[in-house]
Image: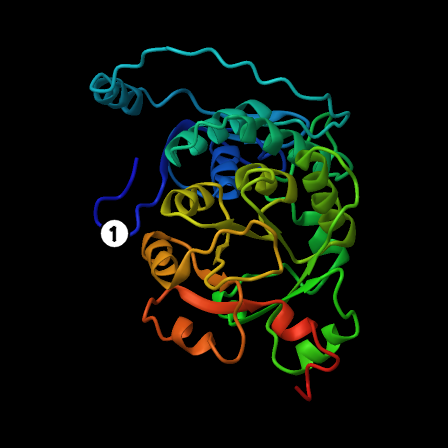
Amino acid sequence: MTSDHSAVKIPHVLTVAGSDSGAGAGAGIQADLKACAARGVYCSAVITAVSAQNTVVVQVKTGMFFGIIKILHQQVQEYPIRGEHLYELCSSCIKTRNTHGTGCTLASCIAAELAKGSSMLEAVKFFVETALDYSKDIFIGNGPRGPFDHLMWLKSNIHNSGGQVRFNPSDLFLYAVRDSRMNRKCVKDAVQGGATIVQLRLYVSLITLILVIWFFHLYVALASDADAVHIGQSDMPAHVARSLLGPRKIIGVSCKTPEQAEQAWLGDADYIGCGGVYPTNTKENNLTVGLDGLKTVCLASKLPVVTIGGINISNARPVMEMGVPNLKGVAVVSALFDRECVLTD
């Protein structure tokens, strides 16, 4: 479902389930709400029963609220359900006690992806598997089964009192991209000179599949606990990256068309990069979209945009004066790092 009263269409899921309260609150409505939040959709809820329980035993559980059930039964008759496809989602086995609510989570994730218009149900498998793996060694309650962390940040909050990284679109204002083949000494100077984000662009000197190269970048981000990762159209889709990285990391996607911008939004990206706006030699076979192409993508995008490609001090002004509200900044590569000293040039 989507809201008809907003300029931005928000994916909306309705969950109908019992309430699972207490220390074992890993299933039912609680699991549905947390799963939908992790997948980036709004969730409304109808409670059909209430329980009071912990990870050991159910203390109190009401009967079904048949008045609610009767009303729902009447309403859903307007939306006949016809099964047309069969999907098999297979994943590795995660050895953990924290499996309470996996069924509810799986159903909610499927509903969330469908609400976003995504046909890539593989994202559901990756999310559930990654959340279980992240939560395998946390301990909540004393029973044989415990809940897992849908948002994948409980352990980070324990070990890092600084809290989660929050994305601010204004951070895209001066986006410095350091190619691994360029001057390494200039990164500190770029930050001191006003760069608001620094991207380290890595290259792998292997003749192999792009999927393997993308996994290399992803695991570098995971292993180094980087704040963000930026992916291209030939890399793994944004929704799969989000499933693997969790909701706290910033994800950017390179886009050249309105259709690609829409897919980035559906995939739960935080921003898009659009270019090259001018011809550049930094990347081979890079299509130039020009100012008109950039404006078209910006107007179609529901996400903030940073533009890239041949931008330097002499041509940045026409880009930033286009008058498109969601164009938040420019990304520069050789204009910063193809020189001896950023601060003095």
Q: Is residue 114 above or below residue 334?
A: above
Q: In percent of the image, x 74 and y 66: which residue is there? A: 182
Q: Would residue 140 be seen by someone viewing this image from the given angle?
A: no
- Given residues 259 and 33, the one toward you in this image is 259
Horizontal arrangement in the rendering, residue 295 relative to residue 172 (left or right): left
Q: Would residue 284 be seen by someone viewing this image from the given angle?
A: yes
Q: In percent of the image, x 70 and y 26: which residue is there? A: 145
Q: Measured from the top left, where is residue 205 in percent x and y?
A: 79, 45
- Given residues 228 and 114, the one toward you in this image is 228
Q: In percent of the image, x 32 and y 11: which residue is there? A: 82
Q: Measured from the top left, where is residue 206 in percent x and y?
A: 79, 40
Q: Is residue 267 above or below residue 320?
A: above
Which amino acid type corresponds to the residue marked 1 in the rendered image? Ser
Q: Is residue 79 above or below residue 247?
A: above
Residue holding disc 1: 6
Please identify the residue farthest to the bottom as the structure is shown.
344
Horizontal arrangement in the rendering, residue 25 relative to residue 257 (left or right): right
Q: Which image quarter holds the N terminus?
A: top left
- Given residues 210 and 60, the one toward you in this image is 210
- Given residues 168 and 156, the one toward you in this image is 168
Look at the numbered disc 1 and give the secondary structure of its residue.
loop
Q: Is residue 210 above or below residue 48?
A: below
Q: Measured from the top left, where is residue 198 in percent x and y?
A: 65, 66
Query: Where on the picture, by quarter, is residue 115?
Result: top left
Horizontal arrangement in the rendering, residue 60 relative to residue 299 (left or right): right
